[in-house]
Amino acid sequence: MSQTTSIAVHNGQAFATGDWGDLDVERFRSEVLNAVVKGGRIAALFAQPRGDGAFRLMAAVAQDSQSVLRVLATSVESEYPALAPLCPQAHWFEREIREQHGILPAGHPWLKPVRFPRRGGSGAAAVASPPPAVCGLADFFQMNGAEIHEVAVGPVHAGIIEPGHFRFQCQGETVYHLEISLGYQHRGVEAALAGGPNRRTIHYIETLAGDTTIGHAIAHCRAIESLSHTRVPPRAQVIRGIALELERVANHVGDLGALAGDVGFLPTMSYCGRIRGDVLNMTALLCGNRFGRGLVRPGGVAFDLDDPAVTELARRARTVAKDAAVAVNLLWNSPSVMGRFERTGSLAADLCRQIGLVGVPARASGIGHDVRQDFPFGIFRFAQIPVSTWDSGDVFGRAYVRWLEVQRSLAFVIDQLKALPPGAVLQPVGPLAPASSVITLAEGWRGEICHVAATDADSRFAWYKVVDPSFHNWFGLAIALRNQQISDFPLCNKSFNLSYCGHDL
Amino acid sequence: MLEILKARLQQGYRTTRYPAGPAPDLPPRFAGRPAIDSGKCRQGCDRCAQVCPTRAIQFDLAARKLRLDSGRCLFCRECERACEPGAITFTREHRLASSTRQALVVTDRAALPPAGIDARLQRLLGRALRLRQVSAGGCNACEADTNVLGTVGWDLGRFGIQFVASPRHADGLLITGPVTENMRSALKETYHAVPAPKIVIAVGACAISGGPYADHVEVHNGAAAVVPVDLYVPGCPPHPLTILHALLAAIGVE
């Protein structure tokens, strides 16, 4: 018999897998749509095989104002009425569901593959229409008419950057539509995580998006700790928080430099490139690796900080704060920079909400969502970092929010280093609870990271779902490019700086 | 304008003097080239191999020697922690590059691997190297620490080494990532677009062996499955100093 209610859980609260419930499809749809209308945001929407040829369709809707995630599920066989026509946030998720399992979200406007995986779906619909064999080989949304032309870029780009394909529909210099086709980095992470945890698990997590090693490792370890009822020592929580904010500072400073480079303003580009390296070296002081590999482990952190290291980190944090202020403030005082940043690639707050943007692009459009505040975890339950927002929604907004966050994160790091709690940094982790699920959110430097895990009867991962912030935000970049000059693409792209590997998994 | 000049003064001159002067400080917890002492190994305990995420460690039963493949190694130090007698340790040696796949395997008192490329190729390339970078499933860490060499801190240009936008302008490729099936044909085409003679440098555990993604059906276990590789640079990711050493070795400066 179908259950008729859905439950709400906190960030990182384990629950019996049966509690996802089993609503009928119509009820499932109306609950998701209602939650979104009331300001909810789809944190995850995915399907998993039930073992009998049918699938469970599951959704986690984040209700920021109440700090809870509404979890709900339904059963589908080969198709269900799509959510996307009424709820654009679901658009990318439903394309993934179609491609991973062959389920047809009927009425979806654009069911193109998002990753072009080698392992196709197992459902009847997947067998009937298998995904294309070659990545990127599919129809693109096209515009017709006199003087319309199409520009194709990638997968191999001009700089040292990951691969993706961008298809612009232009008239003259103006871009009317941009379609982003990804999947080139697909290496089968989610499929490989099932059956874990094992000795490779943490390395998959740390390389999901290599520039977000700490963010993803925190989301993953919190899932393990919740499922195994492990209490992370306070000292480890603080070290994790410091590492997470250093990751944010390093990437934001690097992005501000790259944005300067894209408008030909070389002083800030040069200084920020160097300062970013200085911050990565601070992370290396924690664990030996500039990206934080090997630091965050289930149960805490693998490396403690001794007093000289604390003093040295605080000294370097103050130096970085000073150097970055001089380098970055040049941007806001240079008319040639501001002329390119302002009113380029603008997104209105309402549109951001509709398409479900997270992280810097959302905050730059005035949406005050930040997991550290809305779903506080670890040290952020005790030490709050003010949420940084701006209201212009353009390249300037996304740059300026980054700069606000750099300053606030550095202040946090300096503050936390003053009073590290004593004690151990690593707690042994026991076996995971069987037949349980957990959803963890963390605010990575790009935005909300969501991991959803479920264990089987033997306490292994039955499945493991990862939603990188880029999964929400790539579509936002495409929309931001509308009615912009094609020459502004690099600048807009850099102002989002999304992950290819984090999306492609 | 005055502000820009003031900022320039404040930031100072920050390019490393390496290789003429000392190398930039490596962090105290840096994991460099592994060292092996089979004499300390409690033979048959196998704990190091059991904790290794990428099957980089083997115990050669016939020779009774440990072998650690630095081309598979993620430098996670799990083996070092697992081995109580200390038969495996990670040194602070940053020079890891090798021109042969075989020499990446570390054994007892193994000499540093040869990092110079084929002498004829090196003569033809001269003292300048233009590279096209291709990420084929890389996680953006190898890419980022290659990119950093272009910043003022390292100033790669002073060695005559430059990353270029088109393979047609390049002397070779620097490849990162395990080579996903979805990037295989793009990588191949990029390789063919580089005029011969050309050099291929594989950077990071993924590009050498598939790294953590080894044996996934979605990947090809590294660049060598698709194109011939001249130089291997281990690490996950390699430190910028390790990558710089490899690039300098390729043009015969080191």
Image (spheres, rainbow, N blue to C red):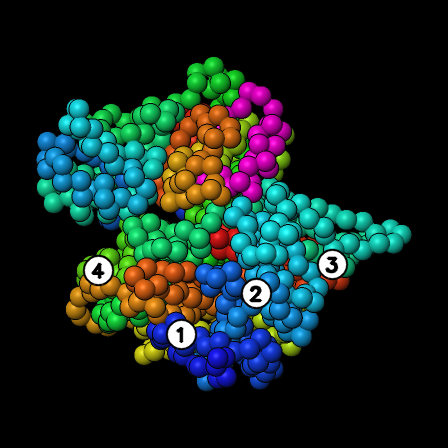
Q: Do labels 1 and 3 touch, CB within 8 Å?
A: no
Q: Position of residue A359 (x, y in %)?
A: 51, 68
Q: Residue at x 53, y 40 (%)?
A: B181
| Label 3 sits on residue | A177
Label 4 resides on the chain identified as A
Q: Residue at x 32, y 64 (%)?
A: A457
Alpha carbon of mark 4 to alpha carbon of mark 3: how far? 50 Å
Label 1 resides on the chain identified as A
Q: Is residue A39 on the magenta stretch?
A: no
Label for residue A77?
A: 2
SS at mark 4?
Answer: loop
SS at mark 3?
Answer: strand
Q: Residue at x 47, y 49 (%)?
A: A188
As drawn, A344 above or below A166:
below
Residue type for callout 4: Asp
Label for residue A18?
A: 1
Q: Earlier in the sequence, mark 4 or mark 3?
A: 3
Label 3 resides on the chain identified as A
Q: Which residues are magenta?
A: B176-200
| Label 4 sits on residue | A304
Q: Position of residue A190 (x, y in %)?
A: 44, 55
Q: Earlier in the sequence, mark 2 or mark 1?
A: 1
Residue type for callout 1: Gly
Mark closer to the observer (4, 1): 1
Residue type for callout 2: Glu
Mark closer to the observer (1, 3): 1
* Number of residues whose C-alpha sits closer than 10 Å to that of mark 1, classed few (under 14), some (14–19) or many (20 or more): few
